[in-house]
Image (tube, rainbow, N blue to C red):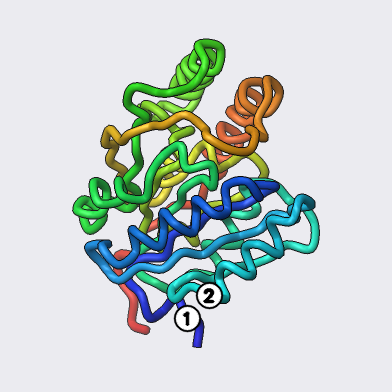
Amino acid sequence: MNKTSEYEFTIIVPVYNELDNIERLEQTFGDYLPKASVPACVLFVDDGSTDGSREAVAAMCGRNKDFYHITFARNAGLSAAIKAGIDATFSPLVGYIDADLQTTPEDFELLLPFAREYELVTGIRAQRNDSSFKRFQSRFANGFRRMMTHDGATDTGCPLKVLHTDAARRIPFFKGMHRFLPALILLQQGAKYHELPVRHFPRTAGSSKFNLMNRLVAPLVDCFAYRWMRRRWLNWSIAETDL
């Protein structure tokens, strides 16, 4: 039996070369999980780290109850790590947070009360602690995405989300599509999402894996991929059956 089925909420944490953050991750989740409003566990997905994170994550999970891990044979990217975590989750709810802890798992408590009503509950980074250039890139990319997808989402890059696991499994994932979760949820008949402000902190260890190309250029290209997929998305409702 998959161990995540024993919980109501599984938190996916993709990890790629975050050795300097492992100790803080252990402390932060060790403090949060006993206080979570629902039975929760954390699932670390090591995305082919080469800096010792892989071994550190395995050791951390070995000494902490409610900590589990998946290890990729080689680097596959953030969307792949999130998808692997979702596929390995058997709790009713699944969450996502980045390993840099620029958001805090404590703020899942702001999102969880809305999780019964909405298939996706996502944070908005209030008072964002990033450089002015990063904030500009995000504002531009978010504005272009809204124009292309009409999803109305404010901040799809916020790495704090809660989803119904069954809805998450129906999301078509490919590289870059983690940026389009609200738009992809809306493709599912009757599904809806909700946004809430959450706290945002400066990175205190390690280094960002994002640059101009994967923060700004790639998301713009992916908008066209989403538009292509939306036109071909299959949706139906059964009026009658004798099965």
Residue 243 or residue 127, whichever sits in front? 127
Splitting the image into 4 quarters, where does residue 215 fall?
top right
Residue ID at (41%, 79%)? 5
SS class of the residue under badge 1?
Answer: helix
**Any mark on residue 203, and which?**
none
In this view, 90 is above or below 74: below
In this view, 97 is above or below 46: above
Q: Which residue bears the numbered disc 1? A: 3
Q: Position of residue 61 (x, y in %)?
A: 55, 71
Q: CA distance from mark 2 to mark 1?
A: 16 Å
Residue 25 or residue 214, whichever sits in front? 25
Quadrant of the drawing holding the C terminus? bottom left
Of the residues shown, which amino acid type is indicated by label 1? Lys
SS class of the residue under badge 2?
Answer: helix
Residue 109 or residue 232, whichever sits in front? 109
Residue ID at (33%, 82%)? 242
Number of numbered discs present? 2
Residue at the bottom extreme? 1
Q: Which residue bears the numbered disc 2? A: 63
Residue 224 or residue 55, whichever sits in front? 55
Q: Position of residue 56 (x, y in %)?
A: 65, 62
Q: Residues within 10 Å of mark 1 (few under 14, many from 20)?
A: few
**Relative to 96, 81 lies left or right:** right
**Between discs 2 and 1, the one toward the N terminus:** 1
Residue ID at (27%, 40%)? 194
**Relative to 55, 38 lies left or right:** left
Q: Residues within 10 Å of mark 2 (few under 14, many from 20)?
A: few
In this view, 158 is above or below 36: above
Of the residues shown, which amino acid type is indicated by label 2? Arg
Q: Position of residue 199 (x, y in %)?
A: 32, 34
**Relative to 9, 131 lies left or right:** right
Mark 2 or 1: the one toward you: 2
